[in-house]
Image (tube, coloured by chain):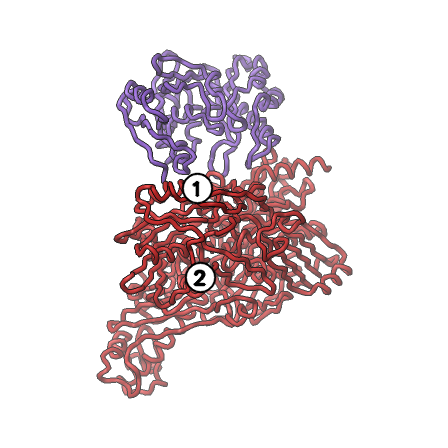
């Protein structure tokens, strides 16, 4: 299918990209294109201008920075998946990236493109929520948005119309911390029907001192499972405690029924995958 | 490369000669064709499932740069309805205009065509065509189409009923149910599928105003049938001035048998604008407009004796035909379905009642297996339901009911006479491969640990090598179903074979050249296979219904026989021997028993074309034509088994093992047959677990993209364990039954039976609707637990 006609721009710097974004009417940012281009080919999206960030300098790469890991927004899923830094400091991000789409998607799609797009069934949102990531946005000014303020609705994020997402920052996992992302994939698209990421920190006695749980797929946007986190915190995470905490995984999720599942089923999957993700995270925290 | 001088080629897994060009991107598909002056078509389609067409405003579209012409249904004067090629008694045949004129009846129904200098100009301009739609209520659900109050789709078909058809003996079935010790009844939904050939449909139509010739390149499984239907029935142009070419075609699964709106419109329009026109379907259009498959809603009842013998089968089916009658639609849920309900079992009596209904959905027609998968699914599901009711083992009940081994005909209760069969042997082989006893032990142990492991069988039969012309003619087919095969030996002894079969993935270029090389004892490289061109091939019925090797191959075999007979006369003349004393051995004509007194094949070929020293009265040349019309269908059969594990928390089904024993008669190329079996199993598993066309009540197809419609992918399937038994058919001299559809037919019930078996400890004996999505399985588990 052919998209409707559009004009293509490939600026070389963030400043130039922002200039175009401010100047052009009905422009969309192209950051890999694995969501936008299919929509354009179906003519569900018909932007007049595409501003491709592919040639913008300084938007790729993964590096450690003051206990955080900074990931350039245009870093591909494949680079995230195979990053030595992430694999050693925060492997759950690499693992999540490895579960996105297929190799073609991962070689072109970018972490920033995905997180700025805010697809309700994308994988990475659950993980960045569980980790407590930060989003660095560049407009007229630079600002940092906490992940809890990022996802607003179906394909709606805190990114301003005149801003670019330039960097995603995730914490290096502290000692005694385990993390895991597990999902129930859509049989056709492989998007998450439900995906849950869990990050738990255990003290020497095996008590949970910190828990982060993000849920994607089920609702209008990925959310933090606050009830689950609260139920985990301060507890010794045996099977009963995990089960009881996971039971709250769908609380606060605005579950959307679709062909892959009724509200009841998807809420149930939230609980099942919360349990499995927490179990996996705890196992790793012990290791 | 093996040659036939030392050993037979039949039965050898020779690599497909067409594959190097396919896998290196050098195939030549319809969309690859570039012609001077080419224009491009885009169709304006109904966004509504049912709507009256009001004013169509073309002003903006016509003004779009690059637009050459725009036609609506009203412009297509002199163009007839798309024909239905299989008629049933009292079948309601509504008009099917290539461009809808007054009413659009499904989402995707074309109402106008925009032709432009480029493809994107055509698409852009098509978006500017403004149609006043007067939306009417739609009906999409199979079971609701004929209900009171359902929206009326065609004037000629009251209550949306296209036909009522039945087969079998209702009184005998009633009697069987009265005396039966056990009866079981189930509601079975065989869901709608989308064929999804890898290459979307496409056509290029070129009218040559200087000669008056029309050439149509089209993604067709049967170019001669396309030409015949289009010229004689729709466009009214002379058949001999039309050439239809189906070049490399990337898959069909049935969906490219039929005459569609688009190639018809392009063939008409090229005569108006006198320029070539190309149209290539987008994947979205393919989902909306390629004929769909299956879509039955059935109530089935089985009556049995206390010891498990099948006394009677009663079937009531509603078959969804979609918005119009596609080319062979009426045959699929009737003669290709009801006649297969005898399965591989001795049955006391059978009766089947089918109602075909129109709905505001994409037309439904043959899709790999076509009617036979629906029948096999029903029979194989019901026998396992019966086993549960009787507390019998599912293998035991099958063994108890198998038709005993036979070599020359078994008369079923539903009109067909099976050719040859040895059903217990295939099943025994399967049980051995599976290690059935051990697997039941493992299952019992796993169940103790709370695991849901299931084993399911499918001992299927199907009818292929379609088909005896006289028989299908008496059943309503408006065509014969023979095949042609021309063998042309060139003066140098090289050979060109012209076959009416059409390869769109099956590997005919390899299989047929292997057959010819084997029979004539010449190298395979000396044999060229030509197919898919009405300009080159006398006539052909094409490829579907697993008929190419058995029907098309036999036609070639017959021509080879004639070549040999003529060659004997020429060789006898050269050797001053009697033709009756000649034999053909190892690539030479020789006096019987005297290999030293011989003329090589090549010398005979040269003599035929340079007939200086030649038998009196014999025509020069060495080329023979044969038309083979089979005396019966052939009936491949087999036994498949599937082992699954169900995740009780999510309802997700994981395939642990898939074991298959097929009997397709003699095999020319085992690797190609294995490939067809493998692909078929994937499609059958796809129906069981993932695939399904889903319509909203308003008629929108919600599984209309590859992101929504779940096709099987390699990582969703286990490694298959496949074997064969060989029971040659007596129907054709090659003993070949046909292999193209077996996997698809067999796999679906095996998988569903396995899932149901996994849920047995919970009291489950049936799941009504496929695909067995995780949610459907989870809800079944939940309901079973609640019911306890």
Q: Is residue A74 above or below residue B680?
A: above
Position of A50 with respect to B335 (left or right) is: left
Q: Nearer the viewer, mark 2 or mark 1?
A: 1
Chain containing mark 2: B
Toward which corner of the image does residue A56 lie, by quadrant? top left
Toward which corner of the image does residue B460 lie, by quadrant? bottom right
Secondary element at tag 2? helix
Residue B382 seen in this snapshot = yes
- The quadrant of the rendering that contains the N terminus of chain A is top left
Q: CA distance from mark 2 to mark 1?
A: 27 Å
Q: Nearer the viewer, residue A212 or B338?
A: B338
Name chain B's colour: red
Q: Nearer the viewer, residue B135 or A240?
A: B135
Residue at 58 percent of width and 30 percent of height:
A266
Residue B211 on image: x %, y %: 28, 65
Q: Residues within 10 Å of mark 2 (few under 14, many from 20)?
A: many
Q: Residues within 10 Å of mark 1 (few under 14, many from 20)?
A: some
Q: Nearer the viewer, residue B539 or B507?
A: B539
Q: Is residue A79 above or below residue B735?
A: above
Residue at 69 percent of width and 36 percent of height:
B785
Residue B756 on image: x %, y %: 63, 45
Q: Is residue B667 above or below residue A190?
A: below
Toward which corner of the image does residue A15 lie, by quadrant? top left
- Contact flag, marks 2 and 1 (Cβ < 8 Å): no
The reply to whether label 2 and label 1 mark residues of one chain is: yes
Work out whether mark 2 precedes mark 1 in sequence or the reverse, and give the earlier one: 1
Dot label at residue B234 = 2
Residue A210 on image: x %, y %: 52, 14
Dot label at residue B130 = 1
Name chain A's colour: purple
Residue B484 on image: x %, y %: 40, 69
Q: Nearer the viewer, residue B255 or B767?
A: B255
């Amino acid at each position: 299918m052919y998209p409707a006609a559009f004009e293509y721009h490939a600026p070389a710097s963030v400043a130039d990209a922002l200039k175009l974004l401010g100047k052009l009417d009905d422009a969309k940012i192209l950051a890999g294109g694995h969501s936008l281009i299919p929509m354009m080919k179906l003519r569900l999206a018909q932007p007049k201008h595409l501003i491709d960030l592919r040639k913008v300098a300084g938007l790729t790469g993964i590096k450690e920075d003051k206990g955080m890991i900074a990931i350039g927004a245009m870093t591909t899923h494949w680079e995230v998946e195979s990053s030595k830094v992430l694999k050693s400091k925060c492997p759950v991000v690499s693992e999540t990236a490895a579960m996105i789409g297929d190799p073609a998607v991962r070689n072109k799609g970018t972490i920033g493109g995905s997180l700025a797009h805010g697809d309700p069934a994308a994988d990475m949102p659950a993980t960045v929520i569980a980790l407590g990531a930060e989003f660095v946005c560049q407009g007229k000014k630079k600002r940092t948005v906490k992940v809890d303020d990022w996802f607003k609705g179906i394909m709606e994020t805190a990114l301003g119309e005149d801003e670019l997402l330039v960097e995603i920052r995730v914490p290096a996992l502290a000692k005694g911390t385990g993390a895991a992302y597990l999902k129930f994939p859509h049989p056709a698209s492989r998007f998450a029907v439900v995906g849950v990421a869990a990050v738990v920190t255990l003290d020497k006695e095996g008590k949970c001192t910190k828990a982060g749980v993000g849920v994607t797929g089920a609702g209008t946007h990925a959310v933090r499972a606050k009830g689950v986190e609260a139920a985990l915190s301060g507890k010794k995470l045996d099977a009963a405690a995990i089960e009881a905490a996971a039971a709250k995984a769908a609380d606060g999720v605005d579950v959307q029924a679709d062909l892959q599942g009724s509200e009841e089923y998807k809420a149930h999957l939230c609980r099942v995958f919360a349990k499995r993700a927490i179990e996996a995270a705890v196992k790793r925290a012990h290791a | 490369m093996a040659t036939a001088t030392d050993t037979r080629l039949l039965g050898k897994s020779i690599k497909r000669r067409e594959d190097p060009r396919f896998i290196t991107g050098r195939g030549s598909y319809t969309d690859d064709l570039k012609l001077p002056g080419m224009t491009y078509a885009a169709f304006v389609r109904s966004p509504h499932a049912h709507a009256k067409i009001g004013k169509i405003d073309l002003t903006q579209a016509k003004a779009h740069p690059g637009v050459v012409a725009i036609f609506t249904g009203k412009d297509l004067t002199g163009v007839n309805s798309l024909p239905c090629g299989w008629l049933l008694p009292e079948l309601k045949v509504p008009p099917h205009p290539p461009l809808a004129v007054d009413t659009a009846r499904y989402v995707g129904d074309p109402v106008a065509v925009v032709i432009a200098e480029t493809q994107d100009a055509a698409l852009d301009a098509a978006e500017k065509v403004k149609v006043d739609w007067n939306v009417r209520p739609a009906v999409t659900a199979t079971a609701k189409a004929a209900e009171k109050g359902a929206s009326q789709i065609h004037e000629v078909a009251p209550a949306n009923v296209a036909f009522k058809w039945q087969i079998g003996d209702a009184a005998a079935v009633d009697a069987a149910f009265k005396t039966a010790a056990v009866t079981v009844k189930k509601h079975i939904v065989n869901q709608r599928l989308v064929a999804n050939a890898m290459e979307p449909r496409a056509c290029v139509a070129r009218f040559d105003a200087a000669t008056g010739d029309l050439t149509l390149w089209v993604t067709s499984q049967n170019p001669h049938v396309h030409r015949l239907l289009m010229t004689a029935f729709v466009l009214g142009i002379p058949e001999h001035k039309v050439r239809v070419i189906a070049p490399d075609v990337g898959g069909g699964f049935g969906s490219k048998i039929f005459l569609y709106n688009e190639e018809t419109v392009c063939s008409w329009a090229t005569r108006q604008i006198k320029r070539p026109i190309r149209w290539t379907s987008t994947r979205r259009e393919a989902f909306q407009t390629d004929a769909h498959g299956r879509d039955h809603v059935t109530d089935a009842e089985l009556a049995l004796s206390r010891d498990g013998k099948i006394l009677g089968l009663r079937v009531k089916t509603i078959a969804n035909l979609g918005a119009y009658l596609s080319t062979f639609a009426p045959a699929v849920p009737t003669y290709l379905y009801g006649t297969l309900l005898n399965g591989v079992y001795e049955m006391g009596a059978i009766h089947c009642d089918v109602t075909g209904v129109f709905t505001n959905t994409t037309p439904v027609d043959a899709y790999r297996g076509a009617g036979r998968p629906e029948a096999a699914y029903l029979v194989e599901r019901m026998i396992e339901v019966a086993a549960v009711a009787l507390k019998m083992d599912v293998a035991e009940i099958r063994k108890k009911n198998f038709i005993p081994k036979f070599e020359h005909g078994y008369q079923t209760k539903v009109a067909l006479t099976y050719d040859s069969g040895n059903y217990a042997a295939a099943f025994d082989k399967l049980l051995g491969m599976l290690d059935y006893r051990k697997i039941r032990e493992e299952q019992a142990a796993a169940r103790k640990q709370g695991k849901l492991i299931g084993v399911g069988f499918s001992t299927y039969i199907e009818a292929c090598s379609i088909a005896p012309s006289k028989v299908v003619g008496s059943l309503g087919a408006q065509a014969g179903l023979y095949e042609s095969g021309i063998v042309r030996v060139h003066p140098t002894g090289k050979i060109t074979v012209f076959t009416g079969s059409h390869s769109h993935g099956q590997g005919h270029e390899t299989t047929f050249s292997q057959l010819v090389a084997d029979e004539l004892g010449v190298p395979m490289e000396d044999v060229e296979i030509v197919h898919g061109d009405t300009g080159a091939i006398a006539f052909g019925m094409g490829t579907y219904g697993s008929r190419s090797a058995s029907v098309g191959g036999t036609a070639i075999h017959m021509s080879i026989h004639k070549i040999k007979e003529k060659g004997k006369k020429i060789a006898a003349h050269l050797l001053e021997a009697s033709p009756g004393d000649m034999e053909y051995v190892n690539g030479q004509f020789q006096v019987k028993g005297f290999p030293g007194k011989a003329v090589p094949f090549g010398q005979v070929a040269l003599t035929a074309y340079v007939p200086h020293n030649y038998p009196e009265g014999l025509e020069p040349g060495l080329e023979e034509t044969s038309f083979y019309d089979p005396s019966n269908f052939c009936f491949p059969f087999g036994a498949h088994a599937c082992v699954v594990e169900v995740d009780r928390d999510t309802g997700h089904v994981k395939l642990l093992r898939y074991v298959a024993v097929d009997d397709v008669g003699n095999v020319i190329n085992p690797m190609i047959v294995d490939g067809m079996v493998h692909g078929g199993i994937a499609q059958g598993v796809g129906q069981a677990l993932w695939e399904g066309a889903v319509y909203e009540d308003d008629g929108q197809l919600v599984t209309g993209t590859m992101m929504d419609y779940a096709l099987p992918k390699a990582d969703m399937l286990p490694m298959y364990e496949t074997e064969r038994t060989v029971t040659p058919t007596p129907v054709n001299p090659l003993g070949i039954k046909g292999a193209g559809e077996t996997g698809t037919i067999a796999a679906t019930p095996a998988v569903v039976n396995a899932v149901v078996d996994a849920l047995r400890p919970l009291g489950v004996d049936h799941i009504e609707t496929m695909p067995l999505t995780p949610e459907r399985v989870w809800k079944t588990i939940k309901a079973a637990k609640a019911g306890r």
